[in-house]
Image (spheres, grey):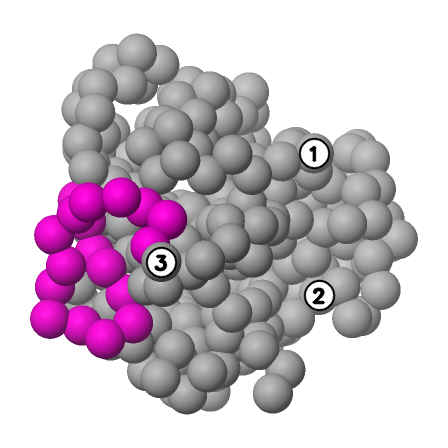
Amino acid sequence: MLIFGRMDALASTFILQEPIQFVSKHLRRKVHVEMFLPKDVDNPAEMSLLLINDGQDMPVMRFSEILESLYSQQAITPVCCAAISCSNDRMMEYGIAGKKDYLGRGAKAGRYSKFILKELLPFIHKKYLVSKFKEISFAGFSLGGLSALDIVWKNPDVFTKAGVFSGSLWWRSVDQDNPKYEDDKHRIMQQVIRKGKFAPELKFFFQTGMLDETADRNNNGVIDAIEDTLDTIHELMNKGYAPHDIAYLELKDGRHDVPTWGRAMPVFLKWGWGNGM
């Protein structure tokens, strides 16, 4: 029995893939979302929902093949995935809601959050006739990872997991070349976590690559991408999260690119929705 109604199936064994488009009043533009739907799900309560930023990268990542492989191995439980393509305004829509960076980027992040919560989620529930998913998570890459983490952190009543691949956790309110810049004061996401409330149901997955970048602003031998991620994990643990609430994957040859994130994706999916067989 298929719970999603009629749609065009690709030549696949375990998933159905369907593009959807609608106009967002909050973003004031047309939004494209690629849906990856597990086949033969009898009970919607058994299915999770995963939102993914930068959905335009899914073909390069070969995301459908990743899902097919995992389902064929019975490695994960059913996950309905919604890959949201970014717009030309990506640097403004992604970021931290209400906290622009020192160049004014992320100015529309609040609108993007409203789009996710007030438009996309209700649209998915209505279109696929699923009144309640088992749980809802959000993942993203680079700046899209920062966006996903911010939205999950601020809405623990909606989300249970965040997946952050090479996240832009350097996002700061003061230019690092400014003599007054301090990591502990001016990196924004770490401050948001520090000032936020502990939500015990949340889980976090972080991925970095040792070749993500070469920048090392404090010359301590650790590239900024890794240090910013580890400092974010430290803030979460100070807030009360235990090691089993947080997964960290560091790829020695990992770069800041889609192929690297594609290699990490099966690890993330098995971490979040492993079948336990």
Element under disc 3: loop
In this picture, residue 99 sits left or right of residue 61: right
Instruction: Please give the name of the residue rendered at 65% of the width and 59% of the height, measured from the top-left corner.
Output: 204
- Closer-to-camera residue (128/179): 128
Q: Quadrant of the C terminus?
A: bottom right
Labels 2 and 3 touching (C-beta < 8 A): no
Per the image, the residue denoted by label 3 is 1
Per the image, the residue denoted by label 2 is 246
Instruction: Please give the name of the residue rendered at 49% of the width and 82% of the height, measured from the top-left corner.
Output: 75
In this picture, residue 167 sits left or right of residue 4: right
- Closer-to-camera residue (16/29): 16
Question: Compared to 242, does 160 lie above or below?
Answer: above
Instruction: Please give the name of the residue rendered at 32% of the width and 63% of the height, measured from the top-left corner.
Output: 39
* Residue density around tag 3, few if under 14, some if 14–19, many if 20 or more, within 10 Å: few
- In the image, which residues are magenta? 2-19
Residue type at tag 3: Met
